[in-house]
Amino acid sequence: MKCKVYPNNLRNWDLDRVKAPGFDDLNQPNITNIEQVEIVEPRELSRRSKTNSSGYLGAMIDSHAHLGDDVFDVDRAAVLERAQAAGVTHIVDICTDLETLERGLELRSQYPWLHLAAATTPHDVEKEGESFFPFVEQHASELVAIGETGLDYHYEYSPKGLQQKWLRRYAQLAMKRDLPLVIHCRDAFADLFQILSEFSLPRLVLHCFTGTLQEALGVIERGWYVSFSGIVTFKKSEQLQKVAAELPLERILIETDAPYLAPPPHRGKRNEPAYVKEVAKCIADLKGITLDEVAQQTAQNAKALFRFLG
Ligand SMILES: [Zn+2]
């Protein structure tokens, strides 16, 4: 079906996320310009993987990508082939509205190694919270998680009170359906921890984490996971790199948040799940361990969180 045209603020919300203190000069590209996309054939990508320094060709999981985004309309099948060629065995496709959920359901029927999560983002709950929620409920049995939901006080595109209300509604749904929550949180950890303490949520991930070490420790003390995106690979991300170095690997997931936040050497281009390997490599370097260890442990963590097999 035809994808809706997103308003500018929605199109850019993931890009905007990196304009936090310390991230102001990232000059994120206009990823809607498809000419900037480097198209690497699966065979070539596979060859590059085989000849890289680590020789690693094992299994990685991209725990958070927006495959329904219309920037993938031109080559979605090739994107998924390249992901497989790069060693990505599972992707969690985050559906944020009816169009992307419908597309996700269709994709999943063709690619059983894709898994779906759904919720209205905290940015859009004012506009779309009520209209999308019944579909999330209706399709809950086809989801591996509820999300991304949460709180974003940095941009506050929706009023704080409404964000909190929807976080509670989605937390209730996650409990009722025994699903994990995928959380987006920006400048709102105190309220996030307070609200989540009202619920019994054994399975949860803080996605695209950009908070402090103290906040990350607050997450793992509760038995939850912290997920790092391409932001951790950026030169300006020293603080975040320290957080990743400190946290136990057993509590870490990796993600692309594609099509946004492409890591080097793909900065300036559209991001895609094959590039999750750059995040894994970065964490391996920070911890002084092998890419293989990072890939294996983060895959095990994702499987425990989302409960998918394979
Ligand atoms: Zn996302």
Image (cartoon, rainbow, N blue to C red):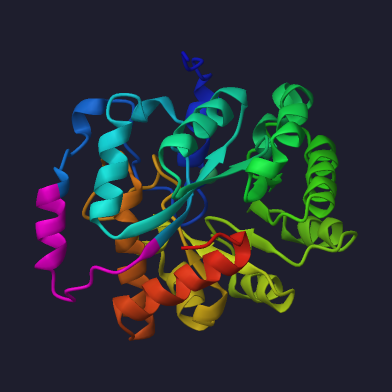
Nearer-the-camera pick, 135 or 192: 135
Q: Range of the magenta residues?
A: 43-60
Nearer-the-camera pick, 212 or 309: 309
Vertical comparison of 30 with 229: above or below: above
**Going by the picture, which residue comes out furthest to the right?**
198
* 83 relative to 100 in the view: left or right: left
Nearer-the-camera pick, 305 or 205: 305
Vertical comparison of 270 with 30: above or below: below
Instruction: Tell me which corner region of the image, top left, top right, bottom left or bottom right, holds residue 301.
Output: bottom right
Name the residue: 54% across, 33% down: 105
Vertical comparison of 257 with 236: above or below: above
Nearer-the-camera pick, 244 or 212: 244
Name the residue: 35% across, 66% down: 59
Give residue 124's position: percent from left, percent from top: 67, 30
Vertical comparison of 295 with 182: above or below: below
- The reply to whether the magenta stretch includes residue 94 is no
Name the residue: 53% across, 65% down: 302
Give residue 267's position: percent from left, percent from top: 27, 48
Give residue 307's position: percent from left, percent from top: 61, 62
Residue 235 appears in the rendering: no
Name the residue: 25% across, 27% down: 34
Give residue 253's position: percent from left, percent from top: 50, 66
* 263 relative to 192 in the view: left or right: left
